[in-house]
Image: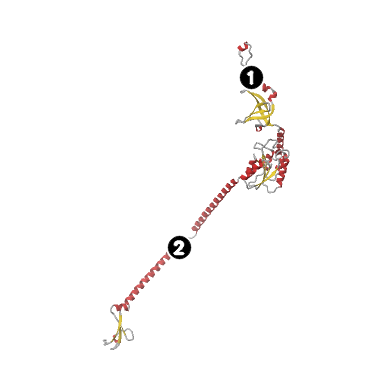
Amino acid sequence: MTGNYDSSDDQSGHKTAYTVSAVADYLKASLESDPRLADLTVIGEVSGYRNPSSGHHYFALRDDKSVIRCVMFRSGRGGQFLADGSQVICRGRISIYTARGDLQYYVDQVEPDGVGALQQAYEEMRKRLESEGLFELDRKRTLPELPSRIAVITSPTGAVIQDIINVLARRYPLAEIILIPTSVQGDRAAPEIVLAFKALNAMADIDVAIVARGGGSLEDLWAFNEEIVARAIFASNVPVISAIGHETDTTIADFVADRRAPTPSAAAEIVAPDVRDLGAYVSGFTSRIDEIISRNIRDSRTQFEMAIDRMNLRAPDTQLPRQRVDDLLARARLAGQRLVESSRLRLETVEASLNALGPAKILGRGYTITRLADGNAATSAKQFSTGDKLGVTFADGSVETTVDEVDS
């Protein structure tokens, strides 16, 4: 070990003094040179977990007696299994963080305690079923847009079914929900899930199915990694949405299903639209129809008016002859009126002339009419003899007299 040496201290018999850095570097080198500490697997409970924006993971491993400070850089594997209270198996190396002199366990890989064999079995089954084509995207079916009957395969007592019912009641109350109860955890779960799918296939008029359960550990979710469950989903008569665990949980059932949802509530949102969105769509569609009808009416009216204009251009001009006829009729009416007026005036003139030449007018000027005894008007004196009676008519009356003398 190298360090700062004080000669006066050495002459007085004191031991050599080393710097803190020298000691830290020595401990670091000693720990890292020990092969048992260079590749070390440790089982413990996670405590004080932190995952800052840098992406590194800081935590401690503890048991009932001791605690080891740990760090796993973001390049490490299995960070999703780190959470306060979780039991994990870590693999890494022991060293010293010389800046603080902290003994630290530098972790490269994390996996849940007791699931190493399950994880290996999961990977083997995933690869085998994938090679058989159960995960092919081309075979996945499209979900119905407006399902009438939705089957839900899950536990009848858990919160999952209530979450799905609540979401659908709020977003899409038009559908009927059919619960097919089954266990979702434990040894009985996988066979019961298979029976649930058989019951589903025996039902009529089911449009889509949701297979769901809440979150849990790998062991809790293992039923949905069973091969018989994967093949039951694959053989379903209707499209299947899987909603197993939380968003970070991925099961074999998720790969086989036609659609994966991160949570059961999300599955309820995926399986059917929101009626409010449907209402808005229908309203918008109605507006577009009204606009199309109005535009067609406008276009038809324009075409009709253009057709009339073309007909007017091609047809003979009847406007001028009609106007000439109207003028002639007006002139004829005026001429008739004038002729009637002229005739009336002439008639009045003749009448006035006749009145002027009538006996009454003549008598009014001092003339008289002499009548014979027989009443006829006398026109000559020779018609009378002495002693004849005669009548004389004046304008205002007549007299009777006797002829005394005839002078002719």
**Viewer-nearest residue: 80 or 154:** 154
Give the left or right position of residue 335, taking residue 308 as reference: left
- Identity of the residue drawn at 71% across and 43% down: 196
Q: Residues within 10 Å of mark 1 (few under 14, many from 20)?
A: some
Q: Secondary structure at mark 1?
A: helix
Amino acid found under the numbered disc labelled 2 = Arg
Could you tell me residue 7's position as x and y percent? 61, 12
User: In the image, what residue type sits under mark 1?
Assistant: Val
Depth check, front residue: 10 or 341: 10
Question: Does label 2 or label 1 sit earlier along the sequence?
Answer: 1
Seen in the picture, residue 333 relative to 398 is either above or below; the reply is above
Q: Is residue 2 left or right of residue 404?
A: right
The C terminus sits in image quarter: bottom left
Q: Is residue 275 above or below residue 68?
A: below
Q: Is residue 75 above or below residue 15?
A: below
Q: Position of residue 201 (x, y in %)?
A: 71, 46
Q: Is residue 347 above or below residue 226?
A: below
Quarter of the image for the N terminus: give it.
Answer: top right
- Toward the top, the furthest residue is 11
Residue 97 x/y as whole percent = 63, 24
Q: Is residue 330 visible?
A: yes
Classify residue 158 by image quadrant.
Answer: top right
- Taking depth in this image into account, of 224 and 214 the one nearest to the observer is 214
- Give the mark toward the camera: 2 or 1: 1
Q: Circle 1 is placed at which residue position?
A: 23
- Residue bearing the label numbered 2: 322
Label 2 close to label 1 by CB (< 8 Å)? no
Quadrant location of residue 165? Answer: top right
Q: Is residue 259 visible?
A: no
Figure colour scheme: secondary structure
